[in-house]
Amino acid sequence: MLFVADSAKTKITEIIHDQHLTEDYFVRVSVTSGGCSGLSYQMDFDNEARPNDQVFDDNGVKVVTDLKSFLYLCNTTLEFSGGLNGKGFYFNNPNAARTCGCGESFAV
């Protein structure tokens, strides 16, 4: 399961509204090779499902990931932090053995 914190839901709803995205758009998250810790998170809005997509609905937000990424993201919570010291969207991933200082990459 992938989870969406209230803070992320609020920001996602705001972005969808501001960009005039239709209700068939969802949040796509994935993991790619790269970053100082070896693996990096990616997040986009998408409206096209792919074969082997894993689909989750939490807190009223549809989140989709590919099967390979889900192995790294299982039980991860998408969060959002705003303000002067905020990071924007970030992933609270219990599977990460270590993360880099910027929080955008991790290792398992």
Image (spheres, rainbow, N blue to C red):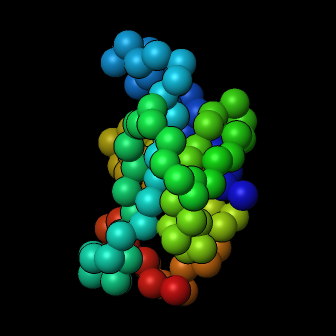
Residue 64, position as x, y percentages in the image? 56, 48
Residue 9, position as x, y percentages in the image? 59, 33
Residue 87, position as x, y percentages in the image? 38, 51
Q: Is residue 93 above or below residue 98?
A: above
From the viewer's perspective, tell me whether residue 78 is left or right of residue 86. right
Q: Is residue 6 visible?
A: no
Residue sitting at 70 percent across and 40 percent down?
A: 57
**Number of marks present in the image shown:** 0
Q: Nearer the viewer, residue 37 or 43?
A: 43
Quarter of the image with the N terminus in it: bottom right
Q: Nearer the viewer, residue 72 or 84?
A: 72
Residue sitting at 55 percent across and 39 percent down?
A: 8
Q: Is residue 33 above or below residue 45?
A: below
Q: Is residue 37 above or below residue 14?
A: below
- Dividing the picture into quarters, in which one does residue 75 lie? bottom right
Q: Nearer the viewer, residue 101 or 16?
A: 16
From the viewer's perspective, tell me whether residue 85 is left or right of residue 28. left
- Dividing the picture into quarters, in which one does residue 73 lie? bottom right
Q: Residue most toward the front?
A: 51
Q: Is residue 17 visible?
A: yes
From the viewer's perspective, tell me whether residue 81 is left or right of residue 83. right
Residue 101, position as x, y percentages in the image? 34, 74
Q: Is residue 56 above or below residue 61?
A: below
Q: Nearer the viewer, residue 25 or 74?
A: 25
Residue sitting at 34 percent across and 83 percent down?
A: 38
Residue sitting at 42 percent across and 67 percent down?
A: 31
